[in-house]
Image: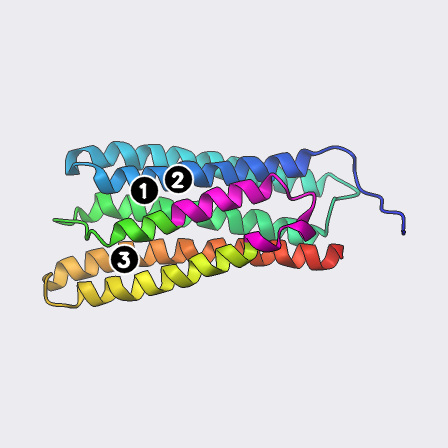
Amino acid sequence: MGLRLTPRDTRFYDMFAKSAANLVVGARLLEEMLGAAADGRSGIAERMRATEHAADEITHEILRTVNATFVTPFDREDIYRLASRLDDIIDHMDAAADLVVLYAPRELPAELNHQVDILQRAAYLTAEAMRHLKSPRDMTEYWIEINRLENDADQSYRRLLATLFSGRYDAIEVLKLKDIVEELEDAADAFEHVANTVETIAVKEA
């Protein structure tokens, strides 16, 4: 067995766990947004924005720490990539919530509930995975399940597009809702990018 000069402190693992915990909060806020009356959405969007700002602070903390650390627990490039991709997810969630308020669509399609449910499940899985990042080789089931959820999200996205272009909505509403739907789809893609990064770390650790 080769000697590994891995730091004994858990700073990076703790920060990644904190970052992923914000994704759970964001997914819950999206669910709350879907069930809220129009006049209650702006308050939810403000809470989402605060969550996104908290996530940004954690991302900056990770980057400052990696730049000040001589020996990191895994490749610096992967630390940068993982931090950035976790941040991407909450950015897309925040954008979706913001667009709901800015565009003020007359109604939110019921099918959005399935899309947000997928994001909630992915958020919980990712938060749990980040708590076990010290042992990435044991996380195969995580990235397989995230990939399955992303495929489910793709199907949900296509069904939503079919609903939007079915003639049920006028052209302006279609444009509004399509932007929101695409941000949620981008969030699902971003969860898969995080899982792919964890798989890359696991391969390098093998």
User: Badge 2: few (under 14), some or many (20 or more) residues near its Cα, within 10 Å?
Assistant: many
Q: In the shown orientation, is residue 205 left or right of residue 57?
A: right
Which image quadrant is residue 173 in?
bottom left
Residue 6's place in the image compared with 177, above or below, is above
User: Residue 65 vs residue 92: left or right?
Assistant: right
Badge 1 amino acid: Leu
Query: Circles 3 and 1: CB distance less than 8 Å?
Result: no
Along the line of sight, the residue nearer the viewer: 181 or 140? 140
Disc 3, SS:
helix
Residue 15 image position (x, y, % from top left): 60, 36
Instruction: Report the span colored magenta.
Output: 119-142
Disc 1, SS = helix
Q: Report how far apart the C-alphas of labels 3 and 2 lie in the structure.
A: 18 Å
Q: How is the image coloured?
A: rainbow
Q: Nearest the camera: 16 or 175?
A: 16
Instruction: Please give the name of the residue rendered at 60% of the width and 38% of the height, measured from the top-left corner.
Output: 131
Residue 137 part of the magenta-drawn span: yes
Q: Is 91 part of what is drawn in magenta?
A: no
Residue position for label 3? 179
The answer to whether mark 2 and mark 1 are in CB contact below 8 A is yes
Q: What type is the residue that disc 2 sits on? A: Gly
Residue located beneath label 2 in the image: 26
Answer with mark 3 or mark 1, whichever residue precedes in sequence.
1
Mark 1 sits on what residue? 30
> In front: 87, or 119?
119
Q: CA distance from mark 3 to mark 1?
A: 15 Å
Residue 155 picture quarter? bottom left
Q: Characterize the magenta stretch by its predominant secondary structure.
A: helix
Q: Secondary structure at mark 2?
A: helix
Looking at the image, residue 132 sits to the left or right of residue 155; the answer is right
Question: Residue 28 appears at what percent x and percent y?
Answer: 36, 38
